[in-house]
Image (cartoon, rainbow, N blue to C red):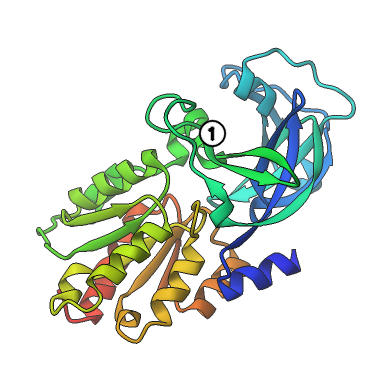
Amino acid sequence: MADTEILLESGTNEIEIMQFTIFGELYGINVAKVREIMMADKVKPIPHSHEAVEGIFKPREILMTVINLPKYLTGKVDDAKERDLFIITNFNKMDIAFRVHTVVGISRISWEDIHKPDKTITSGDDGVATGIAQCNGNLVTILDFEKIVAEIAPETSIQVEEIDRLGDRIARDHSIILAEDSILLTKMIKDSLIRAGYANIKNFNNGREAWEYLLSVRDEPDFDDRAALLITDIEMPEMDGHRLTKLVKDDEVMKKIPIIIFSSLINPEMRIKGKQLGANEQLSKPEIGRLVQVMDQLLEERGMM
């Protein structure tokens, strides 16, 4: 994982993708989400759980949910095989195991080479394919593991009701820049921020779109009003949040914009990388109430409250 850490620290807009197969089809996951790969183990079923949840197991004294990814993705009943593997993941402060058939290897690519699938191949507003990448001559579907878990267990995702616990709020007209590629999460974040009084939100599908907007208003006299604060995810096609953070903080005009990295990937290692790149704060999804509190604090420090 050391090479990945160096890449992300420097904000070079690269990612390492672990490729795996399900029924012969190639899928991918960001290596930063992977703790380890292990042979599939015995799983204890849990009554009345989601049909894609196999149950729980306890490696190294850590109780962990096992999601049958073949079942979730295809609906096919797939009998557990001795050669199946568990991809042990960590994101959103959760450890979750995903059953897969094989692990192929790891490829390092640029986020520019990962493209958002169009709506002809996604279901509803936001499918579980966060991007399509070409690795070693093969097309790989990068899965949105956060969305998979949120669909299976909605209580693990952003809870708009957290805002109500903050008490009475006043309306604010600060222009908030939001870079988030998930349509579902964009809606949930915007709904939460609007409920918290932040109604002036400009959202962009990836870091490149947000960066191009910032460049377009950089030299305007009301720049501070057009970009009071930036919230960015890390994983996004075309340009990731670390690269966006680096570009903004390296610019003499833009560097005063407070940046909050709001991502499922926040862990001690990622926190160090984000700090090195100049992020003002880093929060783990789905801490939406904490996000609003940090926004209040940063805007107050900037003299905008």
Relative image position of residue 137 (x, y in whole percent): 73, 43
Q: Is residue 262 visible?
A: yes
Q: Is residue 64 visible?
A: no
Relative image position of residue 216 (x, y in whole percent): 26, 68
286 or 115: nearer the viewer: 115
Relative image position of residue 184 (x, y in whole percent): 38, 38
45 or 28: nearer the viewer: 28
Instruction: Name the element at disc 1.
Output: helix
Please name the residue that numbered disc 1 is placed on: 148
Residue ID at (83%, 30%): 84
Residue ID at (73%, 68%): 3
Circle 1: residue type: Ile
Q: Quadrant of the C terminus?
A: bottom left
Residue ID at (69%, 41%): 63
Q: Is residue 24 left or right of residue 16?
A: right
Q: Is residue 261 left or right of residue 264?
A: left
Place residue 174 in its image quadrant. Answer: bottom left
As drawn, 174 above or below 193: below
Point out the residue furthest to the bottom here.
252
Place residue 8 in its image quadrant. Answer: bottom right
Relative image position of residue 229 (x, y in whole percent): 28, 69
Place residue 42 in its image quadrant. Answer: top right
- Crowd around label 1: few <14 · some 14–19 · many ≥20 (10 Å): some
Q: Quadrant of the N terminus?
A: bottom right
